[in-house]
Image (cartoon, rainbow, N blue to C red):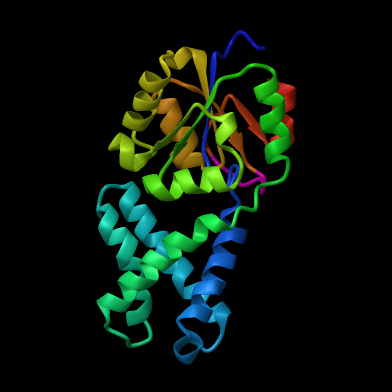
Amino acid sequence: MDKRYHYLFFDLDNTFWDVRQNQYNAQKELFAMYDMGRYFGTFENYLQSYASINEKLWIGYRDGKIGQEELRSGRYVRLLRSVGIDDESLAMRMSDDYLRIVPSFHALMPYAKEVLGYLYGKGYPMALITNGFEQVQQDKVRRAGLSDYFQYVITSEKAGFTKPNAGIFEYALQKAGVKNTESVMIGDDSYNDIYGAVKAGMDTVYFNPAGEKHELHPTYEIRTLAELKDIF
């Protein structure tokens, strides 16, 4: 075990849990359940509209401009209004069903379980730090078979702060009982995960599978999760 780090913190979505694939599958089921083809024509039109609205609202939630409830139902309110349907009750039902359905899909990023097994075998204590709803994120971890690897699943809802606010990292460090200088944060989002952890005084591993350009200076940068074996 690398004595530099006494604790490993990870992001969940798009670091281990494959958001793109799982969201696609869940939305396809929802599209059929509510016969959205009547309004959007194709599933691709529906998904493109949802993704655009969802991304903007998540940024608003991250930045503290909107609350959790507005994010939960607001994305479906706006989605339906984009095709002329003003029905908040329908939007809420769709939101509830989506949050129920999405954890049932559990595609993982390549090498996810292999690397977690390796790190767990080396004795690293690990936790997740994730922007998201407490119950949904907990369900994702459990249904994907990841629960045994992590001591804690720390959500923005539970912590009261969203990444990149240093408060969520400080909450996680306190929960784990470790110092920032003894810990490292691994994640795929250069702003939420890397910039946020740096503000909290932590070392970082930027998981950057697409090789996106950035101006940050993470401690390490990797293209695949398998490369974590070379670091730890």
In which image quadrant can residue 87 be found? Answer: bottom left
Instruction: Determine if the magenta segment contains residue 91.
Output: no
Q: Is residue 211 above or below residue 5?
A: below
Q: Is residue 60 above or below residue 206?
A: below
Q: Is residue 105 visible?
A: yes
Residue shown at 59% from the left, 66% from the top: 25
Q: Is residue 162 visible?
A: no
User: Whole-percent x and y of residue 82?
Assistant: 36, 81
Q: Is residue 232 above or below residue 208?
A: above
Residue shown at 39% from the left, 26% from the top: 172
Residue closest to the far bottom: 38
Q: Is residue 50 left or right of residue 109?
A: left
Magenta span main SS: loop
Report the quarter where the C terminus lies: top right
Instruction: Determine if the magenta segment contains residue 213.
Output: yes
Report the quarter where the N terminus lies: top right
Q: Is residue 106 left or right of residue 191?
A: right
- The span picked out in magenta is 209-214
From the viewer's side, name the closer residue of 73 and 183. 73
User: Whole-percent x and y of residue 100?
Assistant: 44, 61
User: Whole-percent x and y of residue 201?
Assistant: 42, 20
User: Whole-percent x and y of residue 21?
Assistant: 62, 60
Residue shown at 60% from the left, 46% from the top: 144
Q: Is residue 28 above or below residue 101?
A: below
